[in-house]
C-alpha cells in the first residue's frame, strides 16, 4: 500500500511582494458603487441651485416709462424727446443715479442717447415749448434716492429720426445706471 505523501506547508507570503494579479485586479474592487456617488452629486447640485436662486442679484431699482413725447428739430432730420420716468429704490440703502440712457427702436434702426443735463433743460424748453408741456422736474445725474423712496422726473434726449418715426417706434428703453449696482432697464 502506498503511503500518501504529505504536501509541504506553503511558504508564508511576503507582504512586500504581492503578486500583480492581486494588487491591480480590477476597478470593481477599488471603486465604490456609482449609485451613492450620483445621488450625492445630485443632492449637492440641488442645494447649490437653491442657494443661487435665493441669493441671486436683485435689481436696485424698479420703475417705468410714464410718457414719451417728441418734437421735430426744424431744418434737421432729427427730433428731441422728453421721457417721463418713475424710479423706485428697491434697496434698504440710498442709491445715486449715475446716468440715464434712452434707446429707441424703429424700422430704420436703433438709436441711443444719454440724457441732457438738467441745467440745459430750460434752454431747450424756451426753444421748444411743446417739450415743457410734456415734462416734469428733471432727473439729474448724481441724484440720491432714499431707501424705499420713489422719484418721478423727465429726461431730454435727441435722436436722428423724425417725430413721425419716433411716434411709430417699435420699442423705447430707458437704461438707468446706478453707482455700485447693475443698470436697470425700463421698457415701453
Image: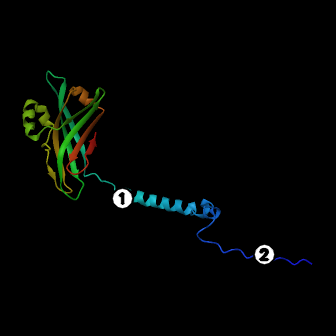
Locate residue 22: give its quadrant.
bottom right
Q: Which mark is residue 54?
A: 1
Observer-nearest residue: 150 or 181? Answer: 181
Residue at the image point whose x is 14% and y is 21% from the top: 75
Side (left or right) of 21 relative to 82 = right
Q: Residue furthest top?
A: 75
Observer-nearest residue: 88 or 135? Answer: 88
Tell me the SS state at disc 1: helix
Q: Check the picture and name the quadrant holding the N terminus.
A: bottom right
Number of other residues with Cα within 10 Å of mark 1, as a class: few under 14, some 14 to 19, many 20 or more: few
Locate residue 113: give its quadrant.
top left
Q: Residue furthest right?
A: 1
Q: Position of residue 153 (x, y in %)?
A: 16, 44
Mark 2, residue position: 7
Observer-nearest residue: 117 or 180? Answer: 180
Q: Check the picture and name the quadrant holding the C terminus.
A: top left
Q: CB of mark 2 within 8 Å of CB of mark 1?
A: no
Residue at the image point whose x is 80% and y is 77% from the top: 6
Side (left or right) of 33 relative to 64 = right
Residue at the image point whose x is 34% and y is 55% from the top: 56
Side (left or right) of 16 relative to 58 = right
Q: Is residue 179 above or below residue 106?
A: below
Amino acid at each position: 500500500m502506498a503511503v500518501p505523501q504529505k504536501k509541504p506547508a506553503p511558504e508564508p507570503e511576503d507582504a512586500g511582494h504581492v503578486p500583480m494579479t492581486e494588487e491591480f485586479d480590477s476597478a470593481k474592487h477599488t471603486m465604490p458603487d456609482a449609485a451613492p456617488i450620483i445621488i450625492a452629486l445630485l443632492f449637492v447640485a440641488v442645494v447649490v441651485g437653491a442657494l443661487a436662486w435665493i441669493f441671486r442679484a436683485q435689481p436696485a431699482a424698479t420703475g417705468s416709462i410714464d410718457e414719451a413725447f417728441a418734437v421735430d428739430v426744424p431744418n434737421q432730420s432729427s427730433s428731441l424727446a422728453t421721457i417721463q420716468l418713475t424710479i423706485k429704490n428697491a434697496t434698504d440703502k440710498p442709491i445715486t443715479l449715475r446716468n440715464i440712457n434712452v434707446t429707441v427702436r424703429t424700422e430704420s434702426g436703433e438709436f441711443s442717447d444719454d440724457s441732457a443735463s438738467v441745467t440745459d433743460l430750460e434752454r431747450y424748453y424756451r426753444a421748444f415749448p411743446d417739450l415743457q408741456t410734456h415734462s416734469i422736474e428733471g432727473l439729474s445725474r448724481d441724484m440720491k434716492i432714499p431707501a424705499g423712496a420713489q422719484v418721478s422726473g423727465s429726461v431730454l434726449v435727441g435722436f436722428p429720426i423724425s417725430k413721425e418715426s419716433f411716434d411709430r417706434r417699435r420699442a423705447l428703453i430707458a437704461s438707468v445706471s446706478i453707482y455700485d449696482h447693475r443698470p436697470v432697464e425700463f421698457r415701453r
